[in-house]
Amino acid sequence: MNSLTSKATLFALPTDQPYGLDRLDRLASYDLNGTAIEPVFDQLAALGAQLLAVPVCMVSVFGHDEQVFIGRFGMAARNIPRTLSFCNDTLRGGNAVHVVPDLSADDRYRMHPFVQPPGNTRFYAGTLLLDRDGMPVGSFCILDHTPRADFSDDARALLVRLAAIAAGALDARRNRLTGAAGQRFVETTTMAVITADHNGRITFWNAAAEAIFGHPAHEAIGRNLMLIVPERFRDAHQVGLARLVRGGVPTLAGKTVEVQALHRDDREFPIEMTLSYWNGPSGQGFGAHILDISARRAREARLQHLAHHDELTGLLNRRGFMECVERCLADQGRATVLALDLDMFKAVNDAFGHAVGDAFLQALSVRLTTAITGDASLGRIGGDEFAVLLTGDTGLVRATDVARAILRALRDPIIIAQHDLQVGVSIGIAVAPIHATDADELMIRADLALFRAKHEGGRAYRIFDSGMGADLAANRAFKMEIGRAMANGEWELLYQPQVALHSGRLVGTEALLRWRHPKRGMLPPAAFLPLLETHAAAFEVGCWVIDQACARIRDWRAAGLSIDRISVNLFAAQIRAGNLEDIVLSALERHGLQPTDLELEITETIALRHDGELEPLRALHAAGVAIAFDDFGTGFASLATLKNFPLSRLKIDRSFVTDIVTDPHSAAIVEGVIAIGHRLDLTVIAEGIETGPQERVLLSLGCDEGQGYLYGRPMTGADILARFAARTRPALIHTLFPI
């Protein structure tokens, strides 16, 4: 352990730089090479192993080349090289508890010799030993041969407490070596330190005890410990004290417990107390280290509230609401759920901003609470989704009465920031045990009724019926088939041409997903895309589409086809996954393509709902991948969305193109979109072009590109090649290849 006293070699890691020689002096002041090390550190290690139920616990300090164990339990070695120390990462992490639930599953440690056989170490948790000035002087850590994914906040707090006691013992050692004999520790610690004799009379009371309990030391010393015990607990305390005096086993000695204590002003408050017991020259004695945990309890209560309540409205969140439904079914066997979804709320957010939208939701929550009378619980279970729980044998009569009351309550606008805001609501009703017997199924059936209400126009309520259940069963079966489609090779891509309107040149194609179902044949997108969007397979299918599209444009070019790009549509699951940038760039590299060869199409719905998850798209756009805004003008995207979104191309929806020749309003809208797109340096492409007159109007309005049956229906990759690779003169594609 010579490295402990060498300032030239101690704490040479980069994490030690802010402390310099001060830390070296501090560590040397413990004289760990000179006098014998107190057994308290081994005792603390044993206590830590017992309380945290692990086979190995260590108290250590660091030298330049080694980690030295001054307290050990379950480990024979007195030191190990620092290059093998898990605690190095604890030192780098600062004051936090460093936990590795499974060392063998962590790339930083899985090849570590202590993790590999015969060591077989699987779990590590450690925290720093901080001296009274906050300087890290060592670590307190535990190891286990079994992974532990459930290392709780209480266990972390206990680890920190034990480390604080060990650090305090180190400080006490230094004080004793300098003549202070530990007195400075108990005088300056923020923990109350109290001792008492066998009669329960207080014999020591430090400054922290004065601050925590409100009694000055001169008033407390000599009085009975009942001074800080609430009256209702005093009999039990006296019985326990008498048992110890008679020679009973001190079952709480060395353990940390949470109890209620009594302040001088007669208020009760929670404390955390570690008890000790001894036989000395003057007989039996008792001691306690005490912390006021009022602030901790308040934080825990706040966290518990947040775990079950929506922070914006104060209503139950989804978790809290579902727990209420589960308790109601467990206690009563009956419950009624109303699922509510606001109609057109996103238009409020888009038009007036999220601050107004949040204020609207808060005011709406108050109005809903007022409208729902009797024994009911209201929750906000999603962005614009609410739910009502009616308990007991309420039946459908009360449920429909509540639904009508909610619909009436939302007839009048809500005034926010001088804006009269009004949205509708669709309501679905399900009753247990008629429609379901557990909470999840009850919510599913209420949601199905809600979807029916929205499908039929909204601003109404519907009650779940068996027909909806049949739809649910069919959807589930269809989803199972979707899950098997990839493995069975049932997905296919077709390609629709995209042309430059001024020249008729093929500039790109859009890759369109189709499902060749083994029994139903080739399915159109409307038959499966809505379900696929919500299926776990959406991410995998989306990645397959990107890869297949990249392979297709590579093959086309190799066969002589001149084409600028290929476009693919993204699923929301690909945005949520967070690794879209890696997926796209890997596919481009794998097929020898440039970023400009690929275009990603994203809908307004994805852009608005996942605005906080669009960084991968921004990175891809910066790298050269084109981003197209699909079906622009049919949703609620605002001009601010165009300004802030990483776009290359706007796609005008076919609904505006269909009657562009005959309807001046459609023509005006298209003209406005084209003008906006060009002012933002975006290329504008129109979908659904089927006739020459439509094409000519779009050309006259300045539209850049077109897509539709005029140029070709969705076709196979071979058909694209056969149709467009042999072009020899510039002319409109539809005149060369009439449909």
Image (spheres, rainbow, N blue to C red):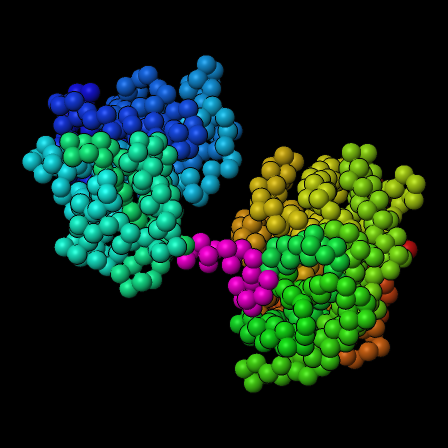
Q: Which residue shows up at 69% across the image and 66% down it? A: 388
595 is within the stretch colored magenta: no
Q: 209 or 658: which is nearer to us?
A: 209
Q: Which residue shows up at 23% across the image and 35% down it? A: 284
Q: In the rendered view, does 388 fall on the left or right side of 140?
A: right
> Residue 505: x, y in percent?
75, 54
Extreme residue toward the left, this view: 179
- Asked if 213 appears above or below 108 in the picture, the reply is below
- Asked if 155 appears above or below 392 in the picture, the reply is above
Quadrant showing the N terminus = top left
- Asked if 705 appears above or below 638 in the picture, the reply is above
> Residue 331: x, y in percent?
69, 54
Residue 585 showing in the rendered view: no
> Residue 495: x, y in percent?
79, 48
Q: Which residues are magenta?
A: 298-316
Extreme residue toward the bottom, this view: 418
Dividing the picture into quadrants, the one containing residue 214 is bottom left
Residue 39 showing in the rendered view: yes
